[in-house]
Each structure stands twice: as structure tokens, then as C-alpha cells.
Amino acid sequence: MTHTVRVALVGLGNVGRALLDLMISKAGTLRDQYGLELVLTGAADSSGAVLDAQGLAPGELRAHKSSGGGAGNYRGGQAGMSAPQMVELVAADVLVEAAAVNLQNGQPGLDCARAALRRGIGVVLADKGPLVHAFGELTAAAKAARFGLAYSATVCGALPVVNIGQRDLVACDVRLVRGIFNSTSNSILQAMAGGGSYEQALRQAQLDGIAEADPSLDVEGWDTANKLVIITNSILGQPATLADVQPVVGITKISAAEIHERAALGQVVKLVATAERENGRYALSVQPEWLPLNEFLAGVTGWEMGIVFDTDIMGLQQFKVDERGPVPTAAAVLRDVINLAAKPAS
């Protein structure tokens, strides 16, 4: 027997479009292995929204967006309808929120998540903003939601950091977490080690479509800090906001000359997030560190991301992933949708 899951999607950027592709290419797998059929019943982006309780065609919407259109001018769309308005009206079982990260107030994703949970719609987040601004509020509200709240895609894409921390480190005392959480900055540092300047490496990353036109979230350390805040709240059990991450230092002051000098000493630079317990609380920081080549994080190269958990009863656990483009993050979103759909209704 196949169970239909109605999906509403906020955000038709790279991750949102990749998810539409997966809804098509993985339809057979979802049906045969999980007994699920995903039906897209609403979508919203900056142009407006489109709703259809009978189901929208993911491939047609994806092609429309790729050709320069938007949800608001798609067939049956409503130009100017906000994403939270769409969530208030859509017939859905789960909301996938994949809007651009807004560090200022987490909007519109935060209001979308609030509206969905208030209506008993489960929420899957790829957008870190709502969690950074209102982790406690959203997790509390999710207890009354039909499918709950999932956000494994917000930390290192397809690498199941949140799942490992919440599900697998059972009864562990986590003493230290260290990680490289931003592949854009990591790849820029790798390019600089190859001989280019920071400006040249950044420009090439932008030309390749790797770095954003405004790369500040990545290269100034804020994307990494966002992920550290989510880990601290969700795995370490300590309420935290961005204000608790001190310092937050990016890679913009690192020179190629210094990288080459340190290489001669057997050191490599990485943008490292750290949560270290001190006097019963975790001290949080994001900053470049010069690491010896034999350290695990020193071997997290190029587009890879990685994390280290130092625990009392499960030892030193180290994980990394090499992922490029939006598909692995969209796959993590799909993982969350499947896991939520498998839970019994509350």
C-alpha cells in the first residue's frame, strides 16, 4: 500500500530545484522501498506562490523556474503571495523550507515554520535561519505537529551530523566538538595553497558558480557559526544563539604567502568551529587554525566538510563528506521527509 505525502515547498533556489528533480528521479524508490508517494501541492518563492491540492508537476515547475519564471507567474500562480500566506492556505502534510538564509531575523522561513506547526503540518528545514533565531520555540511547537520537525540538511548537507549526535551518541558525554562546516571557504583556502591569492581564488569560485556574488556568509565565518549554534542546541543540549559564538573570524585576512610559509612547517590552515566544555558549559568559537598535517581536520580538503566528536564512552569519532552542488543537501531534505513520514501521526 502506498501512502501519499503532500509536500509544500518554500524556496526554488538550487536546493529547492534539486529536490524537485529528486521527487521525479526517486519516485520509484520511494514507492517500492518506503511505500511513499510525494505530491507537490504548493510552492513559493520571491515572485509569489502557486497552490494545487491535486498536485503540481515538479518537472514543469522546475523547467519554468530554470527558464526565468517563478511560482507567482507559473500556471495558476498568484503573484505577490508571500510564502507564509501560502503555508496558511496549502493542503499539505509536510513543509520543506529552503529559502535563502536570513541572519537578521530568520524570515520568511521562521514565519513559514510557525504557520506550518500551528496547523499541524510537519516541517523539514534546509534554511538555518529559523533554527538560529528560534530553536527552542520551534522544537517545543513541533511536539504538537503531525510529522514533527527535522533539519538534518542544515548542518553539512548530506553528512548526517545531527542524526549521529541525536540518535547514535547515546548516553555519551560529549567533551569537545570540532569541525569544518563550510565547503566554500575550505575550497578557497585549498586554491590559495595552490598558488593563487585570496581574491583570485574567490573570483574563480564565483565564476565556477561555487561562491555567491556576496560570499560574506561563507568567507566571514557566519555560515559556520550558524551550524555550530544548531549543533549546540540540538546535540549538546545547551541553548545558544549567534551572540554566544565568540569569536567569529573568517578567512579574508589570510594571505597566500602565509599559507606557503606555514606549509614549509608542516601546517595547513582551516576554518574551524569549536564547542569545548569549560566549567560545565560549552565555549563556542569559529576561527582559522593552523593544523598539523596528521590531524584529521587537516585532511578535510577542498569541497569536503568534516566533524570530530570527543566522547567519554564512544571514543573519538570522526566523519567527513565530499559533496558538490545542491543535490546532496536536497537528498538530506528528502531523507528528513521520509523519516517524518514514517512516524505515526500524533
Image (spheres, grey):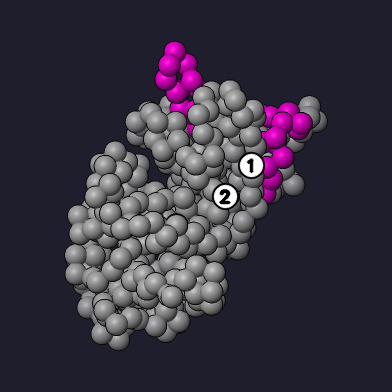
Q: Is residue 1 visible?
A: yes
Q: Earlier in the sequence, mark 1 or mark 2?
A: 2
Identity, as a three-letter code, of the amino acid under mark 2: Leu
Q: Which residue is mark 1?
A: 319
Residue 65: say if magenta: no
Query: Quadrant location of the N terminus?
Result: bottom left
- Residue 267, picture quadrant: top right
- Residue 112, picture quadrant: bottom left
Establish if 150 lies above or below 269.
below
Span of residues in magenta? 274-302
Residue 298: say if magenta: yes
Q: Are marks 1 and 2 in contact (CB under 8 Å)?
A: yes
Left or right of 201, for residue 19 = left
Q: Which residue is mark 2?
A: 159
**Relative image position of residue 175 (x, y in whole percent):** 53, 23
- Residue 209, picture quadrant: bottom right
Establish if 60 lies above or below 314.
below
Residue 63 is tagged as none
* Residue nearest the observer in this picture, 19 or 338: 338
Q: Residue at x 40, y 31 (%)?
A: 237
Q: Residue furthest front?
A: 1
Q: CA distance from mark 1 to mark 2?
A: 8 Å
Query: Quadrant location of the C terminus?
Result: bottom left
**Relative image position of residue 210 (x, y in whole percent):** 57, 59
Identity, as a three-letter code, of the amino acid under mark 1: Phe
Q: In the structure shown, which secondary structural element does the residue marked by tag 2 occupy? A: loop
Q: Residue at x 46, y 50 (%)?
A: 152
Q: In the structure shown, which secondary structural element does the residue marked by tag 1 occupy? A: strand
Q: Is residue 108 visible?
A: no
